Amino acid sequence: MKSFVSVHDAPDIPALLHRAQHYKQHPFTTQPGHQKTLINLFFNPSLRTRLSTEKAGHQLGFQVITMDMAGGWQLEFEDGAVMNLDKAEHVREAAGVLSQYCDVLAVRAFPSLTDREADYADRIINAFREYATVPVVSLESAIRHPLQSLADCMTIAQHSQHLRTRPKVVLTWAPHPRRLPQAVANSFAEWMLAWGEVDLVIANPEGFDLAEEFRAGAQVQHNQREALRDADFVYTKNWSSYDDYGATADLSDWIVDEEKMALTNNAYFMHCLPVRRNVVVSDGVLDGGRSLVLEQAGNRVWAAQAVLEGVICDM
Amino acid sequence: MKSFVSVHDAPDIPALLHRAQHYKQHPFTTQPGHQKTLINLFFNPSLRTRLSTEKAGHQLGFQVITMDMAGGWQLEFEDGAVMNLDKAEHVREAAGVLSQYCDVLAVRAFPSLTDREADYADRIINAFREYATVPVVSLESAIRHPLQSLADCMTIAQHSQHLRTRPKVVLTWAPHPRRLPQAVANSFAEWMLAWGEVDLVIANPEGFDLAEEFRAGAQVQHNQREALRDADFVYTKNWSSYDDYGATADLSDWIVDEEKMALTNNAYFMHCLPVRRNVVVSDGVLDGGRSLVLEQAGNRVWAAQAVLEGVICDM
Amino acid sequence: MKSFVSVHDAPDIPALLHRAQHYKQHPFTTQPGHQKTLINLFFNPSLRTRLSTEKAGHQLGFQVITMDMAGGWQLEFEDGAVMNLDKAEHVREAAGVLSQYCDVLAVRAFPSLTDREADYADRIINAFREYATVPVVSLESAIRHPLQSLADCMTIAQHSQHLRTRPKVVLTWAPHPRRLPQAVANSFAEWMLAWGEVDLVIANPEGFDLAEEFRAGAQVQHNQREALRDADFVYTKNWSSYDDYGATADLSDWIVDEEKMALTNNAYFMHCLPVRRNVVVSDGVLDGGRSLVLEQAGNRVWAAQAVLEGVICDM
């Protein structure tokens, strides 16, 4: 891989899953990061992504440098701009300089949730990809979270082995008090469809359909209970509206609880965390024996190792 | 040790002191952290504790990841909470996830100084201890600072060797312009009493007695000059009131200066730093030949190495 | 070198340049930082300096700890102060403690731009130098940026080899919307003059002459076009006024553009970055084939390696 920003960068998903699974068994097996530097650049805060990527980098032998840019560093992205306002540096220089200080540049960006066109141009990650001379890895961008999706894919693969039939995976919208990006949902759908090993159903309220480019190929249902019937995996996540961009809705009956899970084929429960207990999901489901949320978070490390190896070795 | 939150976790104080002393001579002697990760989680800022623990971790071979959570990450601690307000994650998930990313989880928390019951339940550190599946090390909690106390113990042990009699250690309250936690004082008293190698006198103004659970076994005096008489070590520290919880007092005559030190048995002066010069202690005492403050700070590294080894090797 | 705060600390500039050039070819050639700790202390934010110094430290084998003090930690510098206000720690203790936690202490400070006398006393870096017991390295102080200057020197040396005559280097003031320190310009002038391998001309508007101590020995011109004539290197930088301390001026015609560069001897363009495009320099010059800005930034790593080796090995 030259970079890792979306599923389209992954030439062979099964091979990537295989490497991630290998690292889960043998974390220190190879040291492709020996005498190399990984820079993690955070334009907004992160806990899981930061820790799992740092750990992955260390385990591959990288020197890891994490930079928190939150609040500090305003980048100019426009060509030809007269930079006499608050933008201190153009992304051309920023990416050019950082490329000399590292062998892999990992970037975390975020959407405005107010300007859909700008968000879906995924400007920050794409500008770094354009101007950096080293591989760029997304630590979540405005519209995708591919390291999360790879870890989720890995988790589903591990728990599908006993199934006699092709797994039914339901990605369901759930309530949340705040306006959240579509990145995790977009990316999850994109990966499930590209992977091709599951049947994907997306359940969301009317007005909350994901962008066409991400949901094309999945079955979309606006009746959550119907969607959940016979599911093998229930992937739960809130996202704000794409159509009425950034809007949210007070639909507390979309919570995933024991009664809803009873409609499924004894499905596993999944969520990328952090999760609002008794808003998104009931305590009973989250703490129950079918919850995979901690395993998903754990798999983030192995997914990151596979991706970092992939870009540094151009596998 | 399974974890290190209070003196009660230390099965053998002399053995721990011995290991700390060993590391002071041979910092790189063992590498129990090889291919292991130490995460330091700071819910409030720290200088000495952060640097000494990071250095200790490195010297034991750990990969060290430090996360500053100040201002960023609101945790829910209540069971059954409906998380529709500002708390983004329950400590159950936080501790569960972090446990997958590290082999030792070190946590720095702090008191409210307004809600005594909540503070003395030491909720943050105890929740991590309950839900983490790896050893938890306190980098100061709401009511204790055991790594500081171990370093202090080590410092006293080193400077007691020439004494013919059992050392008299006076922990004295001193003035300060801000309201401070009781953590350092509580912990120091707890360690001195558990160690059993010194006679502990606590000198503080009326209304500033430490909580019964921490001072039981020590002699408490409200006359500083009387308390200091014949002291071998004067450990100086401000703390806010336990009884009138969080209150402070403008008692500048409790400063430790040359005249007060002249009452002692040529005592050593101790303080955990940072210290307000000419408020808590006079320049003359702090810069004098009997001041151990820098040595105390230096011993933080060796204390941390002994503790990290202790929890990772279950010594 | 005992420390590295100004050019006066460098006993032999050509030898230092030679080491930096050596590390550019062989980054991992020596490990003088093995089992040693480098602490980077930032009193104001930094991107290039932080990343290049961390990378340099890692490549020399140091354990690197970076502390961001911005907003957090108010130091007292006055002797005899009664510290009952907002300063929590005296630099004597801070430097004394930090010296026990590291083998090299690197410090980034900044000027007030309001109190010239205080700024030019360079209080923070000099206090650490006075009270630390380990070598102190400046990561930019109130009035100097010697690691930048060494990297600039290295860049000029590399691109001077083809010249038949002694290079003419023009340091030119340029417009900027904000009030900036004089540190980069002061330091650049100081190094060029001490190095002695170039003819230095400083071009700036009237009222923007650098302090006498930094410009003595250079030719100062107030006509930018005249100054640029036959230049081999054009080092561009804004600085606020030394005479009318901290004042700036709206002189957009001081921009460095293609028309101005046409006056030179096909000069290389230099800037320390970050740079305001089309304010300080035109896109055409910055993106043109004679721009050395990325190379300058890259050379920061090798300059830092040479300096860290220099202070740790007392070369």
Image (cartoon, coloured by chain):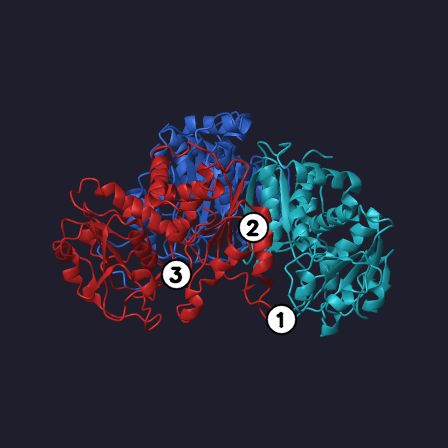
Chain colours: A blue, B cyan, C red
Residue closest to the eye, C231 or A221: C231
Three-letter residue code for mark 2? Thr
* Spatial CA span between label 2 and label 3: 23 Å
Mark 1 vs mark 3: which is more N-terminal?
1
Image quarter of residue B276: bottom right
Amino acid of disc 3: Ile
Amino acid on which disc 1 is placed? Val
Identify the subunit bearing mark 1: C
The first of marks 1 and 2 along the sequence is: 1
In the rendered view, tell whether residue A71 sits above or below residue B246: above
Q: Image height check: is B71 above or below C161?
A: below
Q: Does label 2 lie on the same chain as label 1?
A: yes
| Crowd rating for badge 2 (residues with CA inside 10 Å; few <14, some 14–19, many 20+) | some
Circles 2 and 3, Cβ within 8 Å, touching? The answer is no
Q: Report in which chain the residue with disc 2 lies.
A: C
For marks 2 and 3 on the same chain, the one whose residue lies earlier in the sequence? 2
Residue B196 is left or right of residue C229, and the answer is right
Residue that badge 3 annotates: C143
- The subunit letter for the residue under badge 3 reads C
Identify which residue is drawn at 77% across, 38% down. Answer: B15
* Spatial separation of the CA atoms under disc 1 and disc 2: 25 Å
Instruction: Name the element at disc 3.
Output: loop
Q: Return the residue at label 2.
A: C133
Rendered location of residue B136, percent (x, y): 67, 43
Q: How many marks?
A: 3
Q: Secondary structure at mark 1?
A: loop
The crowd level at tag 3 (other Cα within 10 Å; few <14, some 14-19, many 20+) is many
Mark 1 sits on what residue? C82
